[in-house]
Image (spheres, helix red, strand yellow):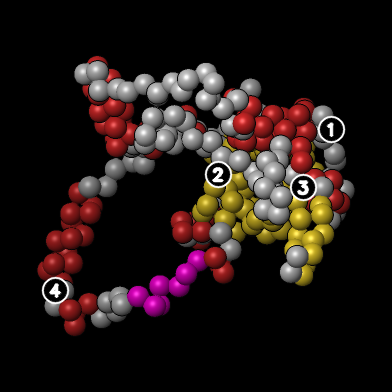
Amino acid sequence: MPHAIWKGSITFGLVNIPVALYSAENREERVDFHLLDRADLSPVGYKKINKLTGKELAQSDLVKGYEYEEGRYVVLSDEDLKRADPEATQTVEITDFVDANEIHPSYYEKPYYLAPLKRGRKGYALLRETLKRTGKAGIARVVIHTREYIGVVMPFGNALELDLLRYASELKKPTELELPGEGVEELGVTEKELDMAKRLVEGMVTEWRPEKYRDTYREDLLKYINRKIEAGETAPAVEAPAEERAPKAEVIDLMALLKKSIEKTESGRKPKRAAHK
């Protein structure tokens, strides 16, 4: 089973559906690179340093702070962030329903899956089938990682998908660009050309099959990398003498620490039922 980001509920009206939130992105499809020192190909780490003392800090030494005046902070724990609005941090609160095709693709930002918990299977199926039959999508507010988003809840096969949306204020307006107007005749576009272009488009119409499209650049890049490996075009990192070698503990894998911290925090968190509206 994938790791749930949080467990909470979908709410609309008086309906409360217990769910878990999961990432819908497949990060394994990405080609990841390590940063290396050009001189000896040693892996490059990075540290969290106290800017005043120059001391290196462990993950456990770090706290979140809001700077309300220059050099003055309010320190907030994870529990403080939940207390600001306990319901919002574990609730997908649907406030409106709209026609799904009215949402322009430029608003979509990041997909998640919602899965029912044991007590929410009936309500989950009810909402999913209702959205399918009406062609509507639920517009919701949700807090993920200390930030509130607007999202859209839509059926995706047997699943309910939560797509985070950009706020209108986050999108730049195209009015600053030099764009041709609707009067295309002024640009010399003829009706015959439009008809020909329309015929070309209609001749290329097909069913939408997402599995048809692949990241061919990634595939070609991996083939190229494998050819270099087979040709022996590799280089090992230069081993420093033992007396000069820095202790491994000094290179902190912050991603691993963060992951362990999140797993430890969320494994001990009990699902909380959102208050009924």
Circle 3 crowding by C-alpha within 10 Å: few under 14, some 14–19, many from 20: few
Helix or strand or loop: what does disc 1 sit on? loop
Numbered label attached to residue 270: 1
Amino acid carrying mark 1 in the image:
Lys
**How far apart are labels 4 and 2 at the CA level?**
41 Å
Q: Position of residue 176 (x, y in %)?
A: 39, 78
Residue 106's place in the image compared with 131, above or below, is: below
User: What residue is rendered at 79% in x and 64% in y?
Assistant: 72
Q: Which residue is mark 3?
A: 63
**How far apart are labels 3 and 4 at the CA level?**
64 Å
**How far apart are labels 1 and 4 at the CA level?**
65 Å
Q: Position of residue 172 (x, y in %)?
A: 47, 69
Q: In this rendering, which labeled residue sits more in front, label 1 or label 4? A: 1
Q: Position of residue 171 (x, y in %)?
A: 50, 66
Residue 61's place in the image compared with 158, above or below, is: below
Q: Which residue is mark 4?
A: 190
Q: In this rendering, which labeled residue sits more in front, label 4 or label 2? A: 2
**How far apart are labels 2 and 1 at the CA level?**
24 Å
Amino acid carrying mark 3 in the image:
Val
Furthest residue in direction bottom, as rendered: 186
Looking at marks 3 and 2 on the same chain, the residue that comes earlier in the sequence is marked by 3
Q: In this rendering, which labeled residue sits more in front, label 2 or label 1? A: 1
**Numbered marks: total:** 4
Residue 155 lies within the magenta run: no
Q: Image quadrant of residue 122?
A: top right
Helix or strand or loop: what does disc 3 sit on? loop
Instruction: Tell whether label 4 touches label 1 (CB within 8 Å).
Output: no
Q: In this rendering, which labeled residue sits more in front, label 3 or label 2? A: 3
Amino acid carrying mark 2 in the image:
Pro
In the rendered view, does 59 fall on the left or right side of 164? right
The region drawn magenta spans 171-177
